Image: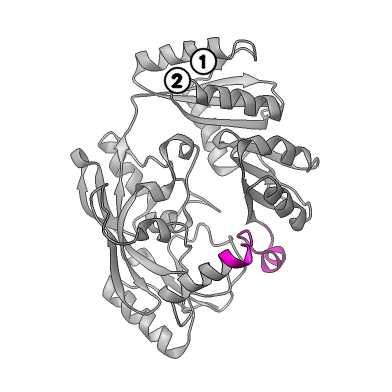
Amino acid sequence: MSETLRPGDATEVTEIVAAAGARGDKLLVRSGGSKRAFGAPTPGVTILDMRGMSGIIDYDPPELVLTLHAGTSLAEVQALVAAQGQMLAFDPFEAGDGAGSTIGGVVAAAVAGPARLTRGATRDHVLGFEAVSGRGERFVAGGKVVKNVTGYDLPKLITGSWGRLAAITQLTLKVMPRPQMQSTLVLCGLAARNAVAAMARALGAPVELSAAAHLADWHGKSVTALRLDGFPPSVSARSRMLAELLGDVGKLDTLGADDGDGLWDAVRHGRPLPTECPLWRLVVPPSAAPDIVAAVPDAAWMLDWAGGLIWLATGADPLTIRRLAEAGGGHASLVRADAAMRAAVPALHPQPAPVAALEARVRRAFDPAGVFETGRF
């Protein structure tokens, strides 16, 4: 049974980490635990539960800047900014098995949804943070303004670090105005290669898509979905432009608001895919996606980010999946599997030796005693 420690402030985090380093203990940084099935099982490792530090520190809607404790729930953050007609532009979502995601966990895992295609990744919206390193030292990086050029760009480094560099205690994020209208247009019946070509054409046109995805099996048919956001007259005009642009590919249909929301929610979570087999997440150049999915004929799959992200549910050999991703110029992460497979197959794509050595040196700089090296990755 793992021990769980829940500090109430950054001072307590510092004390806990320093004590663990002195004893040679390991700490697994966790908040809501919605992504606890990602990576190898870590039985017996002490959990540093960050949910004791939650709440808004400062929110300035006119300046589009939000500062908050890292243990604040994602649901609370999204409700707060929505009430001001704003949003987290990178489209985060409740990843993993059920609700419970916190904003610190979202940034540590670099969770981003379909809008990442056009609005930027999680790291592009993190202005600053406070954290406790494996040395048991509090430090601050970035600030509360977009143009901050002081020192190294640590906010980008900490995003996606999965708690292996430091325990994030506080975050400052850039938010964006929420569009007045969102419209989803779909083409039905396209094969993967034609869908990727259609999405690329739409992205290259002056219609300002906010998202583009292809579902191989959505209610019994393949669907290529294109999303437009903005003021209603602008969305209507751009919808007509898209229909004309893709007229030779097929007829564009417009989904109702509820159906459109349901489709994009499914894309975020990979919900159209079966749950009884391992789930992979491949990030590749969009042009490589059709060949990759064709090379795994037994797989269920869908494409997000106009083909740049492949969700692949398959029992195929893990080495085969990773070789396909590498051959396509990308990488593959194991998102879901049973405990035995997670223990044997690294969740994150293995790095080339020079990159792995550099990564190890960075981790040692933040965490020389390996306090956060739990074996999860």
Q: Secondary structure at mark 1?
A: helix
Q: Quadrant of residue 153?
A: bottom left
Q: Secondary structure at mark 2?
A: loop
The residue type indicated by label 1 comes to: Leu
Q: Is residue 87 left or right of residue 368?
A: left
Q: Is residue 20 left or right of residue 72?
A: right
According to the image, label 2 marks what residue?
Answer: 207
Q: Is residue 315 above or below residue 62?
A: below
Q: Position of residue 4 (x, y in %)?
A: 45, 75
- Is 343 magenta? The answer is yes
- Is 61 magenta? The answer is no
Q: Nearer the viewer, residue 46 or 281?
A: 281
Q: Residue at x 77, y 37 (%)?
A: 294
Q: Earlier in the sequence, mark 2 or mark 1?
A: 2
Q: Is residue 91 visible?
A: yes
Q: Which residues are magenta?
A: 337-355
Q: Residue at x 40, y 69 (%)?
A: 166
The residue type indicated by label 2 comes to: Val
Q: Residue at x 49, y 73 (%)?
A: 361
Does the CB distance between marks 2 and 1 fall below 8 Å? yes
